[in-house]
Amino acid sequence: MIEEDKSLNFIEEIVEEDLRNGTHDGRVLTRFPPEPNGYLHIGHAKSICLNFGLAQKYNGKTNLRFDDTNPVTEDVEYVESIKKDIQWLGFQWAEELYTSDYFETLYQYAIQLIQHDLAYVDDSTAEEIAAAKGTPTEPGVPTPYRSRSIEENLTLFQEMRDGKYKDGEKVLRAKIDLANPNMHLRDPLLYRIKHAHHHRTGDKWCIYPMYDFAHGQSDSIEKITHSVCTLEFIPHRPLYDWLIEKLEIFPSHQYEFARLNMTYTVMSKRKLLQLVTEGHVESWDDPRMPTISGFRRRGYTPASIRNFCERIGVQKRENMIDVSLLEFCIREDLNKTAWRRMAVLDPIKMVITNYPDGQVEELHGENNPEVEGGEGSRMIPFSKELWIEREDFMEEPPKKFFRLGPGLSVRLKHGYIVECHDFKKDENGQVTEVHCTYIPNSKSGEDTSGLKVKGTIHWVSVAHAKKAEVRLYDRLFQVENPAAEEDFKASINKESLHIIENAYIEPDLANAIPGKGYQFIRMGYFTLDTKSTPDHLVFNRTVTLKDSWAKEVKKG
């Protein structure tokens, strides 16, 4: 007996009811059916987590089925990227299938409909068909071809398959009800002609099933028990059921949930493709893109995305999720998993005037103080000359400035307390050097000085520092709902990428692990870019330490 759980979402309630009733012999088989015409985005992640999560929870399975019915837009590149994304998220499909696997079966299903006078070949143009369908308040009217005989339709459909006709010259339509209030039941298209090379079947076919025809029948062929779709497919469900009923095949059933809408983001594949092809972003995996590959390159973790999908839940109504929740999830995860390192992004030199020339100390730093045992440690070289952040020094500091300025003291992270006594400027009046003295008995972990300071700053030894390019990524759009704008591209945030060409990083970061998260102390969370090389290190900012956008909203 399945235990009641008040936190079940409505689809889990349906599954548990089916299991109690012995529906489908106690099986749970879901599917994830992407069209390989682009890269998966965060909205697909919600569907992946739902479909695969249901199967995992109820000891079932999930098929990966590529809906490859439009050869013009599909590519093997997208197939491979989709498989990589699903596995990266932590899921594995039971079977890898393609709608093209079923082309012959679907063709025979179409013949079966024709034989029962439930489908016909129509020579009308797309515009004529649309006009004849009527409006939501006015019934449609039959085209001259609706009354064709079964024999004529069978012959014409075979000729369509044989390549006798040009693209758009004929279509196969279901014969249902031209007065139905649901426009999807007014003789919908089942097949269209497309003389295009298919990435799997080559030139074997020149007719291809429409999504509404291929979807439910593919579910039925695979004996899918719970076909989970997004809300926009609610009007399509009656056709899904009609086709299964008329073909007398396995009764898969469709259930709908609200897709993910997220602030400061667009989810349309068409719009994402525009961003790529028009050069607004570097590629599909640009770290500003909402694609799963973009999030991966930016340093998001599978756990953070799965946690995000779990937190937003499964709803029956559309809503807008604040992107700050996703950012919270990655901060929460990286706080527990990211190794701490020091990097100086806007450097000025500090000279410790009383530190011995040529002396180098190895200071000890835990990898992650948030974890018991620190997850190990690394040694950090310390010397007379250090790089520090420009913002950590002020020539005339205000009263509550707890960093460096004339007469002010701070602790150097993992190191000593230092006091500023002088500084140098260049001819433009810009500070180039800060001169300090250190307190020898104030070393972290061994401090006997008795001195107390309110500020701690990070640093990198000049003699040991490695150079790196650091990319500071921010939200790609400036408005909460760019999709609602007349021109969504007009709201692109021109400050969404700031490149620092010569940052200084502690030497251990030269051996940064690809895919690993690092907290640059006080600066944010970062990861090694996929295109980084040993000779040109590149780090991407995953997310800031705090939600800087929340401050902007408050200011506004």
Image (cartoon, rainbow, N blue to C red):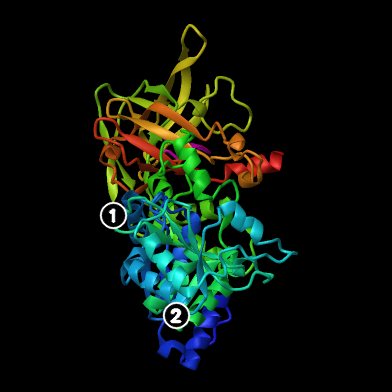
Name which quarter of the figure residue 435 lies in: top left
Disc 2 crowd rating (10 Å Cα; few below 14, some 14-19, many 20+) is many
Residue found at x 45% / y 26% = 346
Residue type of the residue flagged with mark 1:
Gly
Q: Residue furthest right?
A: 137
Q: Is residue 27 left or right of residue 95?
A: right
The secondary structure that dominates the magenta segment is loop
Locate residue 115, reporting x and y percent: 45, 78
Residue type of the residue flagged with mark 2:
Thr
Instruction: Determine whether 232 is above or below 470 in the image.
Output: below
Task: Kindly identify which numbered label has been placed on residue 225.
Answer: 2
In this view of the protein, can residue 52 be seen by the observer?
no
Locate residue 259, reporting x and y percent: 56, 61
How many numbered tags mark residues here?
2
Q: Secondary structure at mark 1?
A: loop
- Residue 434 falls within the magenta-colored stretch: no
Name which quarter of the figure residue 151 lies in: bottom left
